[in-house]
Amino acid sequence: MRAVGVFALALLGACTTPVEGGSYALPPGVASYDTLKAATDKCHADGGQLALRDGYDKRELSNYQCNIGAPR
């Protein structure tokens, strides 16, 4: 299970889509506990906060974005 988290973190680092102000959307995939945990940790390390975009399905990873510069 730990290998899945490490792989997800590597995938997130390579496949992010820039948004405005340094924020970025996550790549397509299933928003499992492990992938969301890895994405949250990476986002916090980048100085941001992971958030589900308004009106989107929480089961899809690409519906989340890391808001950098957002209040915590």
Image (spheres, rainbow, N blue to C red):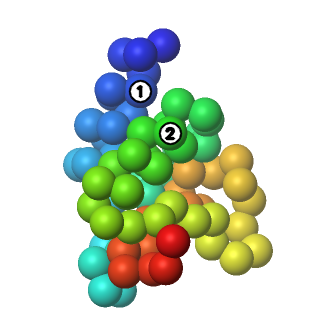
Q: Is 15 drawn above or below residue 68 in the view shown?
A: above
Which residue is depicted at the point 70% across and 48% down? 59
Q: Is 29 drawn above or below residue 16 in the view shown?
A: above
Which residue is depicted at the point 63% across and 51% down? 60
Q: Are marks 2 and 1 in contact (CB under 8 Å)?
A: yes
* Mark sitting on residue 5: 1
Does 24 sit left or right of 52 as displayed? left
Q: Which residue is mark 2?
A: 37
Which residue is at the far front? 72
Q: Amino acid at mark 1?
A: Gly
Q: Position of residue 40 (x, y in %)?
A: 46, 50
The quadrant in which residue 17 appears is: bottom left
Q: Position of residue 4 (x, y in %)?
A: 42, 21
Tell me if I can see residue 25 in this picture: no
Q: Amino acid at mark 2?
A: Lys
The quadrant in which residue 21 appears is: bottom left
* Mark sitting on residue 65: none
Q: Position of residue 3 (x, y in %)?
A: 37, 16
What SS does tag 2 mark? helix
Q: How many marks?
A: 2
Q: Position of residue 32 (x, y in %)?
A: 61, 35
Tell me if I can see residue 14 in this picture: yes
Which residue is depicted at the point 33% across and 26% down? 6
Which residue is at the far bottom? 20
Query: Which badge, 2 or 1, comes first in the chain's sequence?
Result: 1
Compare residues 70 and 6 and report the one nearer the observer. 70
Alpha carbons under labels 2 and 1: distance apart: 8 Å
The quadrant in which residue 70 appears is: bottom left
Q: Is 2 drawn above or below residue 60 in the view shown?
A: above
Q: Dot 2: few (<14), some (14–19), or many (≥20) neighbours within 10 Å? A: some
What SS does tag 1 mark? helix
Q: Dot 1: few (<14), some (14–19), or many (≥20) neighbours within 10 Å? A: some
